[in-house]
Amino acid sequence: MSIIFSIFADMKLYLQIIIALVAGALTGILLPGATPYISWIGTLFMNALSLLMAPIIFFSIINSIADIRDSAGSLKRLTAKTCLLYLLSMAIAAVTGLLLVNLIRPGAGVPVAQVAMPDNISGKSFEEIITGFIPTNIITAFAQNNTVPVILIAFVGGLAFLKISGESGRTLRQFFKGGGEITMLITGAVIKASPFGVFAIVARQFSTVGDFMGLLQMMALYMLTVIAGLLIQMFVWLPLLLRFFRVKAWRHFRNMSEPLLLAFSTASSNVTLPVTMQAVQRRSGVSARVSNLTLPLGASVNMDGTALLECVAVMFIAQAYSVALTPVQQLAVVAMSLLSAVGAAGIPMAALVMMAVILNMVGLPLEGIGLIIGVDRLLDMLRTALNVYGDTCVAVMVAKSEGETLAV
């Protein structure tokens, strides 16, 4: 047994995570009764990563802004490039989903009788989304890991920090730099334990596999449509964008194996952020100046997979209820998918909450969410992997456009 553990410890982290994924799935399927005794390991791992989310975002953005010596001009340029590339990749994903769902029509013939609306899904008005960007209490934003307000606070704090000079400015600079270093050191220790956390999380997820095997058969076409869109975005459109910036797409994809596997396991782009930042900096060679700005922002606003899924899911529900949406309505669905994807938190199943906004807009019943709730967890894991990969691609493209020499 000690020899096995020794071999496991000597493996690369991504191989350890793959083994943990397989072992967790087999444990959940074959020994579902054992999962209550190990699920606490996954909970501890998720809690540890969640604990680091707000500090990483806060210190990373402030340090990134502090590293930009020419202040406003460079910061505006980096932010503009990042936001434009994020918007472009999300728009491509949403349009891809719209074309596929109209071509395949997975909702035609799906029975909609006795579909129950989940109790925890409720609509959010765009007024609530927009006003939620600025918190009423700064401590609450950090305590609840509300990433968009944390990003705004860090941006405002970073810009204010640029105005402070002399001894006070140097002291603050050392404080923020030290805070970032301490946070990343703790993150490194947590990452080393990720295979054990992944094993427990996957085992718990697969322990209920018997509950949705029948649902998989009915929803197979819908799942295939979403998966096809995710694969096209990941292996066609994003590589083409990388190619345009003269980046070796396959090498970058291999470098991102660890954050992608962790994103798939946890279904949370925010929880994966510490691993993503380390991989982008150490393996693809992106500077901290660029990655500290682009990746925390992307974890909250860049949701390629979420935009694609929401577009497909709304059209699927319309097809299931035999509601023919006009081309104008379908374009509105694409636009709303982009906006609601930005408003979605980087946590598991947040897309279902935001989907209620789009369903209300086009007059579809909210009960339609009950059609897809059963298979959303698996698709959530897949789209989160795409969300994270899209973030890393934009970070690499922005770095390349800034003239950085990369490992890809």
Image (tube, rainbow, N blue to C red):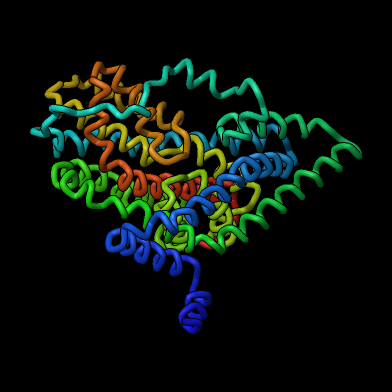
Identify which residue is drawn at 19% across, 29% down. Answer: 115
In this image, 200 relative to 81: left or right? left
Point out the residue furthest to the bottom here: 3
Question: Residue sitting at 24 percent across and 20 percent down?
Answer: 365
Residue at position x 39%, y 29% in the image? 338
Foreground residue, 306 or 35?
35
The mark total stands at 0
- Residue 38 makes an appearance in the image: yes
Rendered position, 225 above or below 13:
above
In this rendering, would 51 be left or right of 322? right
The answer to which image quadrant residue 152 occupies is top right
The x and y percentages for residue 242 are 43, 51
- Residue 68 is situated, as x and y percent measured from the top left of the image, at 71, 42
The part of the image, by quadrant, that contains residue 377 is top left
| Rendering coords of residue 224 (x, y %) | 20, 47
Query: Is the residue 395 above or below the residue 100 in the image?
Result: below
Asked if residue 138 is positioned above or below residue 43 in the image, the reply reads above
392 displayed left or right of 235: right
Q: From the viewer's perspective, is 164 left or right of 294?
A: right
Instruction: Please state which of residues 183 and 140 is positioned toward the viewer in this rendering.
Output: 140
* Coordinates of residue 148 in the picture (x, y in percent): 56, 31
Q: Residue furthest right?
A: 167
Looking at the image, can residue 260 be seen? Answer: no
Which residue shows up at 49% across the image and 77% down it?
5
Viewer-side residue, 116 vs 154: 116
